[in-house]
Every structure is written in structure tokens, then in C-alpha cells.
Image: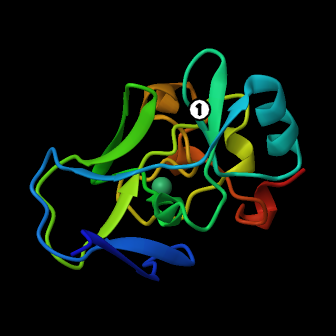
């Protein structure tokens, strides 16, 4: 029996769900794909491929193929899975005990060079507004609470 099933996400198109209770620490599934060079990776990213995953200093994995079930995992700022690199493989691992029916997520971990292309709508109470690696949250130009969204200011305060 598969540990996961695909279904409508709570916040982003399709998502991946626990099909049965999964203990924390379980390797749930592998992020599979074509091994490509960093040069090829850069080319594909520029072409709009958002399924490329860092593997090591020389290679990335392109998980865009539909056979890669892990491509359905959505980003969350409060994820319940983590990513582990092991022996040239990328694994999605349960970060805590999961209940059947829970939507699975991990932090996509974009860095500050490209996070603005990936706004986040995960709905977590601590959502930082972007699919940004946790270690960079303190480096955001403004925290979300203080950000004046365009059009949200009182018109009398504009010059
Ligand atoms: Zn978020």
C-alpha cells in the first residue's frame, strides 16, 4: 500500500496526502528525476521549470516528470516533512508523526536571490509570504506584519 495519495491541496492546486498514519522519521518517498549539470539546471530554471532540486555541487535533479510523485508536494512555511540527501538520493521524510489524510509539505528552501518569484499562500500562522528557506526569514526587507500592501494605505497619508 502506498503511503501517499494525490488530491486537491488545501492551498495550492494539487497536493500529496498521507494515505495512512506515518511515524515521524519515515522515508516517505524519493524525489526522483533526471540528474542534470548545474549549467543545464540554470537553463531549465530560466525556461520556467520549478521542479529542479539541488543534489550536490555539480548536479541537480529535474523532477518535472509526472512519474515523480513527490512533485505534488507543496511548500509550507510550517511543514510536516523535511528533505534528506543520502547517497545521491533525495528523500522526503516525515518530520513528525502524521495522521492519515494530512496534506504533506516541506519548505522549498529558496534563497534570497529568487524568493520574490515565489510568493506563498500556505496559510500557516507563521507564513513569511514567500517560499523562502527558514534561515533567511530574518533577512526579509520588511516583516509581513509591517508591510504596506499596495493600495492598502489610508489615502490621506499619501503625498
Ligand atoms: Zn507560507
In the image, taking residue 158 as reference, residue 103 lies left or right, namely left
Query: Outermost residue, top direction?
Result: 57
Q: Is residue 93 above or below residue 37?
A: below
User: Between 4 and 114, which is closer to the camera in this rendering?
Assistant: 4
Report the residue marked by disc 1.
Answer: 140
In the image, taking residue 124 as reference, residue 148 lies left or right, namely right
* Element type where label 1 sits in the image: loop
Identified at 65% across, 61% down, the residue is: 65
User: Between 76 and 26, which is closer to the camera in this rendering?
Assistant: 26
Residue 25 rendering spot, x and y as whole percentages: 15, 44
Is any part of residue 145 visible from this angle? yes
| Image quarter hosting the N terminus | bottom left
Identified at 61% across, 51% down, the residue is: 63
Sort mark 1 into few (<14), some (14-19) or many (20+) by Cα contacts within 10 Å. some
User: Between 103 and 66, which is closer to the camera in this rendering?
Assistant: 66
In the image, taking residue 146 as reference, residue 101 lies left or right, namely left
User: Between 102 and 43, which is closer to the camera in this rendering?
Assistant: 43
Query: Outermost residue, bottom direction?
Result: 8
Residue 38 rendering spot, x and y as whole percentages: 75, 25
Identified at 80% across, 65% down, the residue is: 155
Identified at 90% across, 50% down, the residue is: 159
Residue 31 rendering spot, x and y as whole percentages: 47, 49
Residue 128 rendering spot, x and y as whole percentages: 49, 47
User: Residue 18 falls in which quadrant of the image?
Assistant: bottom left
Number of marks? 1
Is any part of residue 141 visible from this angle? no
Q: In this view, does 155 lie above or below 49?
A: below
Q: Is mark 1 within 8 Å of ligand 1?
A: no
Specify the color scheme. rainbow
Amino acid at each position: 500500500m502506498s503511503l501517499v495519495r494525490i488530491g486537491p491541496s488545501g492551498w495550492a492546486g494539487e497536493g500529496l496526502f498521507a494515505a495512512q498514519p506515518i511515524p515521524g522519521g519515515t522515508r516517505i518517498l524519493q524525489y526522483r528525476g533526471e540528474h542534470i549539470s548545474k549549467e543545464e539546471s540554470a537553463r531549465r530554471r530560466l525556461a520556467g521549470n520549478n521542479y529542479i532540486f539541488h543534489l550536490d555541487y555539480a548536479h541537480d535533479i529535474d523532477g518535472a516528470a509526472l512519474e515523480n510523485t513527490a512533485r505534488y508536494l507543496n511548500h509550507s512555511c510550517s511543514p510536516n516533512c523535511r528533505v534528506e540527501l543520502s547517497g545521491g538520493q533525495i528523500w522526503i521524510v516525515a518530520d513528525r508523526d502524521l495522521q492519515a489524510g494530512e496534506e504533506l509539505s516541506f519548505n522549498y528552501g529558496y534563497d534570497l536571490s529568487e524568493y520574490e518569484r515565489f510568493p506563498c499562500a500556505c496559510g500557516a500562522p507563521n507564513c513569511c509570504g514567500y517560499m523562502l528557506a527558514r534561515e533567511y526569514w530574518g533577512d526579509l526587507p520588511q516583516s509581513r506584519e509591517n508591510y504596506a500592501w499596495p493600495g492598502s494605505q489610508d489615502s490621506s497619508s499619501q503625498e
